[in-house]
Amino acid sequence: MMISVCMATYNGARFIEAQLKSILVQLKTSDEVVIVDDCSTDETVGVIKQLKDPRIRLIENASNHGPIYGFMKAIQYAKGDYLFLSDQDDVWLPNKVDQVMAAFEKQQAKLVVHDGIVTDQSLKPIDSSWNHFSHRTPSHLLFKTLVKNGYTGAMMAFSRELVSLILPFPKKLPMHDWWIAVVALKHHMKIVVLSDKLMYYRRHAGNVTGSHKRIPEMIKFRLRMLASLRNA
């Protein structure tokens, strides 16, 4: 059984080495980390290449497309039976892969999501739970998830069976993790929500997740998601 870790990077040189090392130590020689770099202007690509790990597959975009496109492209290139999504700036705890894979194998899950410890940029804990910190709790109800996304991509993994259903991502998709969750719910796939904190979720000025949207924009996102879901 092969694992693919899918990552989108952009100007992540400060934290990418620590994140990749925390991931690679948990993977087998037959696993892979698929990284799509979105035209970084810092040393992100150089740091990745310096690791010289044959399990890393680096794809460099010719132009900037944003993180959602990056994740879609990484998923498209992934060869694994199970796909883990990863941000560029977090740190996985040593038991993350084993815990998530146990949910797939023992509970026949198709999508697994877990909790994390929220930290500042120096990995100093801010909150013992991302779900508590963000007021985002994964729900097994489709309508509730459409109203408020409780799924965080950096804490998500899913079976290859879901790939053909989620790709290609709809145009102008608000968030990739939201889309993956609602598609899984629509198709009644088994979702396992782990209370375990399996990573340090680093918060800093450059984070994409957690940015605030205006109410009209939020309503537009939900209507767009609902329209896209009809064809998924």
Image (tube, grey):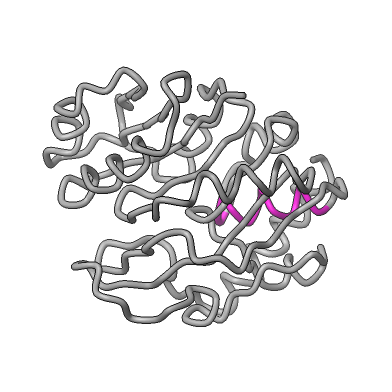
Q: Position of residue 18 (x, y in %)?
A: 23, 48
Instruction: Say which residue appears at 65% left-offset and 46% top-offset.
Output: 102
In x, y percent, where is residue 170? 64, 41
The residue range painted magenta reads: 174-185
In the rendered view, tell whether residue 8 sits above or below residue 124.
above
Q: Residue at x 30, y 25 (%)?
A: 60
Image spot of residue 198 (x, y percent): 47, 59
To which quarter of the image does residue 54 belong? top left
Residue at the image position 64 percent from the left and 32 percent from the top? 168
Which one is in front, 57 or 66?
57
* Direction right: furthest residue: 188
Q: For residue 49: magenta?
A: no
Residue 226 falls in image quadrant: bottom right
Whether the magenta-drawn stretch holds residue 183 is answered as: yes
The image quadrant where one finds the C terminus is: top right
Residue, x 64% and y 27% (percent of image)? 81
Q: Nearer the viewer, residue 100 or 32?
A: 100
Secondary structure mostly seen in the magenta stretch: helix
Instruction: State which quarter of the image contains the N terminus.
Output: top right
Q: Quadrant of residue 47?
A: top left
Residue 121 percent location from the top left of the image? 22, 67
How many numbered marks appear?
0
